[in-house]
Amino acid sequence: MGLELRQQLRLSQQLTMTPQLQQAIKLLQLSRMELVDMVQQELMENPCLEEAAPSAEEGAEEMHEERADAVDPDDIYAGEAARNAEWEDYLGDFSSSPRQATVRESELPEEANAFESNYSARPSLEGHLLWQLRLSPFSEKEQVIGEVIINNLSSNGYLCCNLEEIAALADSSPEEAERVLKAVQCFDPVGVAARSPQECLMVQLKILHYDRDPVLVSLVCDHLEDLQARRYKPIMRKFKLTQEDLKEYLDIIQGLDPVPGASYGDVEPQYVAPDVYVYKYDGEFAVVLNEDGLPQLQLSALYTDSLEALRGGKSKEYLQERLNSARWLIKSLHQRQRTLYKVMESIVRHQQAFFEEGSSKLKPLILREIAEDVGMHESTISRVTTNKYAATAHGVFELKFFFNSSLALSDGSEVGSESVKLLIKKYIAEEDAKNPISDEKIVDMLKDELSVNIARRTVAKYRMSLGIDSSSRRREVL
């Protein structure tokens, strides 16, 4: 078998993801807050980027504000003192405010507490309990046991280890650990450091002096699962209770806190900044991009001129690379905002009934329809609508909210699934708590109001997605 080398010329097309294209795709997926952080990071790292100066009108407003702020506070205090001098001399010692205090307030205005100083850090569960432990009349050994207990609590306030482990860590006996544990469980929040939900609720009942009722104690210790599942009839037969008596017990139990450490959790609220605003002006809807807080970028003239002066070397190569990166970033940001604007305009056209009347008029919509309308790929529309929010007259919604599946009506038309979900939520909110409506009844109500063809399992799926329990769990005692 002979081997030989040959040269062949072949023409082919291949799609490659350049770093610039990867950056443009990444910008589409970023939320507004992430985009602002990324732009600020680029401003610090790229010397060829700088923030554009404000326009002429903005500059005039800033100059006006600077002039207003340029008034010397000492002149204000001096004028006030001159106007009040004669009156204060007349009052003398009978003045309502001592003269020394008035002078000190005028001399040291900068010592006034800042507005931010009125806020304090949110206390943690561990810190709150350790503060109470320090104030308790415990010995040094008991203090050590208490610290071990507090350091082994979960985020919900439950104890994560047994008494033998606590005693071993604190070099004490299980009896001493048990005694300190009972004292810690009476700290605020009451029921913390419990080992089970029954123990947590029993500690709270003891503090409220409800532990003398054997029926209430038995309900908490032995029948919590039955109460959660709303199996009331066996409980009423066992304890020979009427519905009114059982309701009184339930009111007491529901007033307790089974998760005492939840209010001291580390989860902070996540705030949403809308990317676009939709306003109605002269009978038409206008889309306005939210540019607040997003720096307006431009190329630095200093480094651009320096690049032309350099003849070669690593310095020129570095500046050229940074300059190209800055130009591509500015172009990618402009393309991102332009794409977001076009997509939101298309959504407004397709969902105009929603912007007019609210969520009940939300129509079925898929990504393909918007992609065909704006002339882009579905994957681009998916990236643009991810983690983006629109502020409308009916609230702030994620752009994904406007895309929903359809349900067929008896007349051949379609209705959006979100509109059906809102109707289900409305029906359940208006139901009689003592006689909640079933999923079969909701199916009949939807057919009467919308003439929609929907199955019971679909109603159950929508109800569960809304976080609503079944009718048996929603039923309340008389």
Image: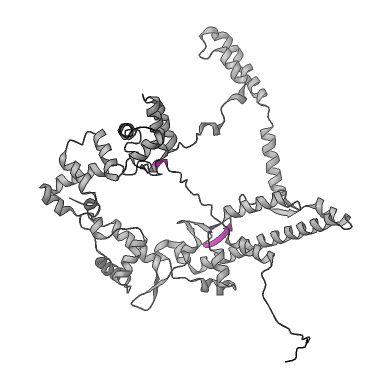
| Viewer-side residue, 197 vs 373 | 197
Position of residue 434 measured from the top left corner of the image (x, y, whole percent): 20, 54
Position of residue 284 measured from the top left corner of the image (x, y, whole percent): 53, 63
Position of residue 151 measured from the top left corner of the image (x, y, whole percent): 42, 38
| Viewer-side residue, 374 vs 122 | 122
Residue 476 forms part of the magenta stretch: no
Which residue lies at the image location 45% right of the left edge and 64% below the top edge? Answer: 354
Residue 286 forms part of the magenta stretch: yes
In this rendering, does residue 279 appear at all?
no
Rendered view: 373 above or below 177: below
Q: Which residue is at the far bottom?
A: 1
Position of residue 368 measured from the top left corner of the image (x, y, whole percent): 52, 74
Q: Is residue 104 left or right of residue 456?
A: right
Q: Which residue is at the far front?
A: 1
Rendered view: 5 above or below 321: below
Q: Which residue is at the far top?
A: 93
Give, as a single range, the part of the protein colored magenta. 263-291
Rendered view: 262 above or below 414: above
Q: Is residue 8 left or right of residue 133?
A: right
Which residue lies at the image location 42% right of the left edge and 70% below the top edge? Answer: 405
- Quarter holding the N terminus is bottom right
Rendered view: 80 above or below 260: above
Which residue lies at the image location 50% right of the left edge and 36% below the top edge? Answer: 121
Q: Is residue 130 left or right of residue 211?
A: right
Which residue lies at the image location 45% right of the left edge and 38% below the top edge? Answer: 124
Specify how the rendered protein is coloured: one colour
In this rendering, does residue 165 appear at all?
yes
